[in-house]
Image (tube, grey):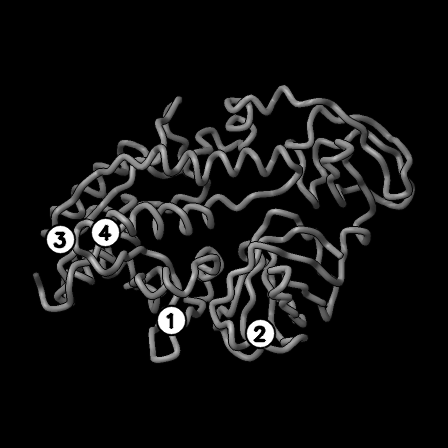
Amino acid sequence: MQPNGRVIVAMSGGVDSAVAAGLLAERGYDAIGVTMKTYSATKPAYAKSCCGADDFDDARRSAAKIGIPHYVLDFEEAFRRNVVDRFVDDYRAGRTPNPCVACNNFVKLGTLRSFAARMGARYVATGHYARLTVGDDGPRLFAGDAAKDQSYALAGLTPAQLAGLILPIGDLAKGETRAHAERLGLSVAQKPESQDICFVEGGDYRDVLERAGVGSEAAGAVVTTAGERVGSHDGISHFTVGQRRGLPATHFNDGPRYVTSIDPKTNTIVIGREDELAAYALVAHEVNLIRPARFAQPGVPVRAMTRYRSPLNAARATYDASRDELRLQFAMPERAIAPGQLVALYDADSNEVLASATIREAA
């Protein structure tokens, strides 16, 4: 084994994970590339999605160029159970899921981590743009380059998971990553980025829901925030908080209407004005404290991100350990808080990620 130990590199077929593998090999790690087969496509790959047959070939070629072993592993069952099924269940319950967070939590740092342990590898590495340090006080996660920061997608990882993770390109900008790929002679150096959910093959998540039988759900009422019925819907899974398209035709004199909330118990979509999307607080569960000591007292000053790449909003955070519940009070109103989304909490004065939780409701 090489001096820095064995590491399993999750290689998607893109430039980021390929460069991550190449840099680790240069640093003396015993790197092994692994591409995860997470689902079986039912149609030709969508242009902006990943994990198709071409991506497997790109990952294999990159590993061969770097000079490391490469394997394709069948993780379809773990991915279906932990990512796709949760995705479907969330939409069925009127929530807006974040499947990339679930994949990181349960597949890359779950199933793949277990495989790594069987291979004698202490670490798993990915091509995420975020910085990670490990000291006497445990792992610390920081935002990466502002243009490509992906710390939000990793904020659901526990301290134990973060301690077994390496982020080789976390300090780089995207242009620097491509420059390394050119230097390493990788054919993926200028490969376009994948931007969509890998298992949403046609670019529309409703296809996934229909294949899972969610399209047959019951119709229900669309009402205003004042309780006035203004139309009907074909199923709550077709809506998310903040949505404007797809609502019944309405004629209000004070502007357009948006989905302000979804009530799965009554199968009701509630719509309101733009200003009615604003909330000053939220309640979240499934709390993950990366820096638990920071939440010993109530009203901790933080900056919160309630959706991927949404602006950070100053807030006060209070963690209730007895309920495993997190409450946030925002300094300025937050728009379109969607149950099911992850909220990531950053230090008030730096770009360190302190905690995350799944939003239960706007308060």
Helix, strand, or loop for circle 1?
Answer: strand
The three-letter code of the residue at mark 2 reads Phe
Q: How far apart are labels 4 and 1 at the CA level?
A: 19 Å
Give the mark nearer the N terminus: 4 vs 1: 4
Q: Which residue is mark 4?
A: 116
Q: Which residue is mark 3?
A: 66
Q: How far apart are labels 1 and 3 at the CA level?
A: 29 Å
Q: How far apart are labels 4 and 2 at the CA level?
A: 32 Å
Give the mark nearer the N terminus: 2 vs 1: 1
The three-letter code of the residue at mark 3 reads Ile
Label number found at residue 295: 2
Q: How far apart are labels 3 and 2 at the CA level?
A: 44 Å
Which quadrant of the figure has residue 305?
Answer: bottom right
The three-letter code of the residue at mark 1 reads Pro
Give the mark nearer the N terminus: 3 vs 2: 3
Which residue shows up at 17% across the image and 50% down it? 119
Q: How far apart are labels 2 and 1 at the CA level?
A: 16 Å
Give the mark nearer the N terminus: 3 vs 4: 3
Considering depth in this image, is 353 or 273 the residue closer to the camera?
Answer: 353
Mark 3 or 2, closer to the camera: 2
Pointer 3: residues within 10 angstroms few (<14), some, or many (20+)? Answer: many
Label number found at residue 139: 1
